[in-house]
Image (spheres, rainbow, N blue to C red):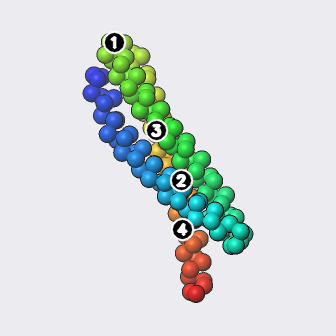
Amino acid sequence: MDITTPALLFPAVSLLLLAYTNRFLALAALIRSLYEMRSSELTPRVRGQLQNLRLRVVLIRNMQGLGMSSLLFCVVSMFLIFMEWMMEARVVFGLSLVLLIASLGLSVWEIQISVRALDLELEDLERDPT
C-alpha cells in the first residue's frame, strides 16, 4: 500500500459529503415550510411526516459524521504511510473504509424512508384529485 491508495477516497468522499449536504438542505427547506403552516394544517398525517423528518435529520447528521470521520482516517492513514508505519496505516485505512461503509448504509436507509414518504404523498394525490 502506498500513499495514493487512501488518496483515492478523497474525491469519492468529497462528492458523497456534497450529496449529503444537498439532501440536508432540501430537508431543511421542507421542515421550514412545514413550520410556517404548523398552526393551520397540522393533521395526523403531517404529524407522522414530522416523525419521519426527525429521523431523516438524525440519519443525515450521522451520515455526514461518519463520512467526515472516514476522510479524517484516510488523512491519518496517509500520514502513517508517510512516516513508514505500514501496519498502523493499514489498520487506520481499514477503519476509514468501515466508516465509509457505515455512512453509505445509513444513506440507503435514509433514501428508503424518503421514498416511503413520497409514496404516501402519491397515494394521497391518487385518492383526492382536488
- Residue drawn 70% across the image and 73% down it: 40
Q: Please provide percent x and percent y for residue 30.
A: 55, 62
- Residue drawn 33% across the image and 12% down it: 83
Question: Mark 2 = which residue?
Answer: 110
- Contact between marks 1 and 3 (CB within 8 A): the answer is no
Question: Mark 3 = which residue?
Answer: 67
- Residue drawn 52% across the image and 63% down it: 115
3D distance between C-alphas at marks 4 and 1: 50 Å
Question: Mark 1 = which residue?
Answer: 83
3D distance between C-alphas at marks 1 and 3: 24 Å
Q: Which of marks 1 and 3 is nearer the N terminus?
A: 3
Q: What residue type is labelled 4?
A: Leu
**Quick one: SS at disc 1?**
loop
- Residue drawn 41% across the image and 50% down it: 19
Q: Which amino acid does label 1 sit on?
A: Met
Question: Mark 4 = which residue?
Answer: 118
